[in-house]
Amino acid sequence: MSARFTAIYEKGEQFYICYCPEVPGANGQGETIDECRESLKEAIKLILQDRLEDALKGKPDDAILESVIVE
């Protein structure tokens, strides 16, 4: 899956912190912006995967499931 999200970075005393406004709860941190970015990417993947798995638990057997690409 490929998607584009916004990352907002802030410099703390020792670490960078970042968050993604499109995905509530997706936060990252790291000593460098690169580490912070990778941390945020992993958080976004985990949150979206969890939300999908949770949503699929209640899917009726006759529901249609497909991928939608947003550009």
Image: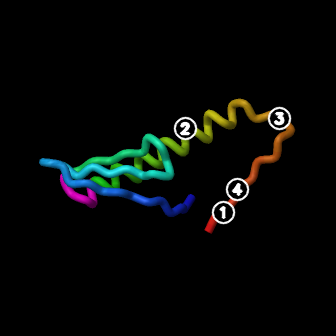
Mark closer to the chain start, 4 or 3: 3
Mark closer to the chain start, 1 or 3: 3
Determine which residue is flagged by label 1: 69
Residue at image location 55% in from the left, 43% down from the top: 49
Q: Is residue 32 magenta?
A: yes
Q: Amino acid at mark 4?
A: Ser
Which mark is on residue 50?
Answer: 2
What secondary structure is marked by label 2?
Answer: helix
Kindly report the distance in space between the C-alpha atoms of the residues bearing marks 1 and 3.
23 Å
Residue 6 percent location from the top left of the image: 44, 60
Kindly report the distance in space between the C-alpha atoms of the residues bearing marks 2 and 1.
19 Å
Q: Amino acid at mark 3?
A: Asp
Q: Amino acid at mark 2?
A: Asp
- Residue situated furthest bottom in the rendering: 71
Residue at image location 82% in from the left, 41% down from the top: 63
The residue range painted magenta reads 31-35
Kindly report the distance in space between the C-alpha atoms of the residues bearing marks 2 and 3.
20 Å
Q: Quadrant of residue 33?
A: bottom left
Do residues under tags 4 and 3 come within 8 Å of each other at their CB atoms?
Answer: no
Mark 1 vs mark 3: in front? 1
Mark closer to the chain start, 2 or 3: 2
Kindly report the distance in space between the C-alpha atoms of the residues bearing marks 4 and 2.
17 Å
Determine which residue is flagged by label 3: 61
Q: Residues within 10 Å of mark 3 (few under 14, many from 20)?
A: few
What secondary structure is marked by label 3?
Answer: loop
Residue 22 percent location from the top left of the image: 50, 52
What secondary structure is marked by label 4?
Answer: loop
Q: Amino acid at mark 1?
A: Ile
What secondary structure is marked by label 1?
Answer: loop
Quarter of the image containing the N terminus? bottom right
- Residue situated furthest top in the rendering: 58
Residue at image location 39% in from the left, 58% down from the top: 7
